[in-house]
Image (cartoon, helix red, strand yellow):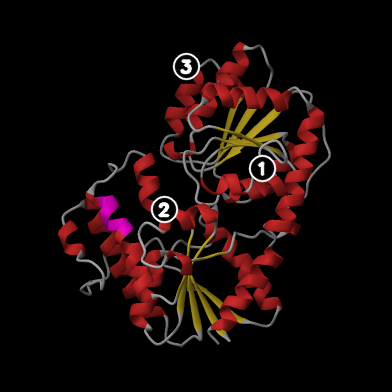
Amino acid sequence: MKVLQALFFPPEQPGGVSSMVPYIQERFDKLNWDMELFYIPKRVRMKGSEPVQFKTFDWTVYRGNAIVDKYIQTYKDYLWWTQMRIQKRYDLIHAHHPIAGMAMKRLFPETPVIITLHSSYETELILNGKISENGPEQAFLTSLYRELEANLDLILTASNSFKNYLSKYVEEPDKIEVIPNGFDENRFRPIVHENQVPQLISVCRLVPAKGLDILLQACSELKRRELAFVLHIIGDGPIRKELEQMAADLNIYHETIYYGYMLHPEEFMPFFDIFVLPSRAESFGSVFAEAALCRLAMVGTQVGGIVEQIDNGRNGLLVPVDDAQALADALETLMSDSELRNRLALAAREKAENDFSLNRVIEQLTVVYRRYS
């Protein structure tokens, strides 16, 4: 069976699905499957010119909006690149982005095309202050879910939370299937250690949706309580300078270390004590599973896929969104109780190994793929 994994971002893109799918391909290769990866290079811009028409809605009513126009042009570019690069045929195409899914089905209508929807672009744009809620951009982007349902053979998501979100925009939500993300446990090597000063770590793209402003406020409160700590932030993004200035304004500049983008943060994470990320939204939150496999105590927010990974008080702690005081309280609880940290970290590792293993993903995808063979 010849399977094409159709990504949007190249595999070296930091975090998320782009860095996960190559491990899926590698595991299927070991099982003697014929599987390839495909994506559009970042350098391909303004090449496509084919007219775009959707079955389920008229996108042209949104024409003239910068984000919509850019999205449509990117779709055209993906069509152009795919026509240029793919000459062979596959038995199944598994897309990992709406643009990839729509392009593949348009160009190969006789081939089964399934898609895993990993996140909500419109939610990210709203939380990052790029678009207004209930505006034309949100209407356009959410209309694409029904378009995918009408054209593709199957929609998958990584969490029940995101499936519930999608149900508002499709006609048959019960047909959406959930396969949580999976991770190769061999990549994660927990290290037994005891830091004299608690070491906090957060790994994410530096955008407002990740709630790092709340984390800095919480850390400022910890310092006010005269608690020693070091906060390590791995990742880069458009608000890095703003966050650095905020740390200085909150008098925690010397307690905060910014590393920028790191290709394999899982090699670095096991040396720390507490993973914390107060996201305002997460469709799944892969970094929490990665932190769990590194055997770190975790603090997250009560949103999206995070609550499907953290059982509050059993394998981590959950706090409300945008609540710096509650976040500081949770961090202080873990910082002051090494026995609790270890107990939660061990439980987190056990759950991640059971629920988010790459072997489990391979088994579930094999069943899905063979459905179309």
- Between the C-alphas of marks 1 and 2, the distance is 24 Å
Q: Amino acid at mark 1?
A: Asp
> Which residue corresponds to the image point at 63% horizontal and 71% vertical from the top-left?
364
Residue nearer the viewer, 89 or 244: 89
| Disc nearest the viewer among 2 and 3 | 2
Residue 45 visible? The answer is no
Give residue 311's mark.
Answer: 1
**Region rendered in magenta:** 137-142
The label on residue 249 is: 3
Residue 273 in percent (x, y) is at: 73, 34
Rendered position, 261 above or below 178: above
Give the vertical position of 14 relative to 224 (above or below): below
* Residue at 30% across, 61% down: 143
Q: Does 139 lie within the magenta span?
A: yes
Q: Residues within 10 Å of mark 1 (few under 14, many from 20)?
A: some
Disc on res. 120: 2
First in residue order: circle 2 vs circle 3: 2
Q: Nearer the viewer, mark 3 or mark 1?
A: 1
